Amino acid sequence: MKKSLRNIITGAILYSGIFGISNNVHAQDSVPNSFYDKSWNFRASMQTRRRNVEAAVSSDNKIYVVGGYSGSDNRWLDDVERYSEETNQWSALTSFPYETSGIAMVSDNKGEIYVIGGKDNQDQVLGNFFRYKPEEDSWEQLPSLNHPRSGHEAVSDSQGLVYVLGGASSDVDFVSTVEVYLPSKNGWADIFPLNEDRANFTALVDSRDRVFAIGGNNNNGETNSVEMFDPNNYNLGWQFMSPLSKPKQTQGTVGIDGLFYILDGWLPGYSSEVEVYDPEIDKWYLHSNTIRATNNSGVVTSKTGKIYSIGGDGDDTRVEVLNPFTPTPVKASIEIDPDIINKKINGGYIDAIITLPPEYNPKSINLQENILIKRIIGNSFNPLYFQFAESIPKPRIGDKNKDDVKDLTVRFDRRNLVANVSEGELIFFIGGFLGDGTPFIGSDKVYVKGR
């Protein structure tokens, strides 16, 4: 049975409260799965550089991106691309009917993909509404919005209703209007407006079909406010909920196993921060950062539960992925060499000797994925610190610890490491992946001597 991600996150938070762990805790005690829920990795890049990216996932688990803006070419885009998680490849499709940016994209309960509103290449705010027809690789125009807008958000609930929220009717006119597309009537209906005007925000629907509007900006700048609308308590309208830790706009949000992941965005300054929200208890938690700091990226979750951050500012083509639902990790034996680290010596490398259980061959370790120090428990300066293994010199298979069992030796930069830990006994957790995607993790104690 798949472990509830809420339980994993809760366990991670409880565990993170004991970073001052006593020395009588053995380094090989059981390791929470949360140590494996924190690794972002790159996937195949898009063919087209773009910011203001919108993305959606179809019923057959293909990721679609539409339009956006290319600063390097100084042009609005009509390019459409589709990503296959199975092959890790992007393919170009028939162009959108016109060059556009500032759109909202959403897939409904049937996996049908819609593109809503936005601007054209003349900077005109639009109310257009299109549905993608994958069998024909074409776009079907549907009834237009009641209120043209860009920089807005769209979500769909379990009944197939499409909500369009907020945005801007011009560069300075932020709006709070909310309208709903009713498939049975093939038309739009206005409902309660948001309490605050907001654009460049993010929105999500929870398992109870409650709609959340998170962050964004308006004439007062960035906001960290969060609003919620419950259609089952319609007359209550929009209610304020616990805010983000700090004001943020142009971020992305996805929902997995009842939790919301909010990532990327503008603080001001590009953000790599990830926050996790539990709508059932109205509480926020911090997660691990993405590899790159960006905003205006497309953020979606695939049918397999992976989170994707796609493109973004800087005309990025890059794609990052996080898999919160990792299998139970293989318990590896880790030996850190040297096991006494002298901070007076800050050059060279620290070796980690990885030995898998007898039924596994160290050759099965996937060297294309990152092997890293995933966590250090003890008197470390930064409890969320992690460090990737060096690719040069190349990891070596042998029997370095002379126990007649094949092992893999990877190296970590000593200078980087000693700059991020303080004196005393520490526990290093080392992890990576096997070729079939199964994670492995293990730990070892080291002692750090002062300068």
Image (cartoon, rainbow, N blue to C red):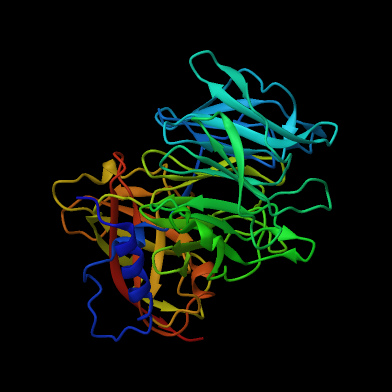
How many numbered discs?
A: 0
Q: Nearer the viewer, residue 23 or 313?
A: 313
* Residue at 48%, 77% in the rendered image: 421
Q: Is residue 88 above or below residue 4?
A: above
Q: Is residue 17 above or below residue 113?
A: below
Looking at the image, can residue 253 be seen?
no
Q: Position of residue 142 (x, y in %)?
A: 62, 25
Q: Position of residue 227 (x, y in %)?
A: 57, 62
Q: Is residue 358 left or right of residue 386?
A: left
Q: Is residue 322 left or right of residue 23?
A: right
Q: Is residue 58 left or right of residue 434?
A: right
Q: Is residue 15 above or below residue 264?
A: below
Q: Position of residue 224 (x, y in %)?
A: 63, 67
Q: Position of residue 39 (x, y in %)?
A: 43, 54
Q: Nearer the viewer, residue 380 or 315?
A: 315
Name the residue at the front extreme.
235
Q: Nearer the viewer, residue 8 or 174?
A: 174
* Residue at 75%, 27% in the rendered image: 99
* Residue at 20%, 59% in the rendered image: 402
Q: Is residue 334 left or right of residue 89?
A: left
Looking at the image, can residue 100 be seen?
yes
Q: Is residue 65 above or below residue 385?
A: above
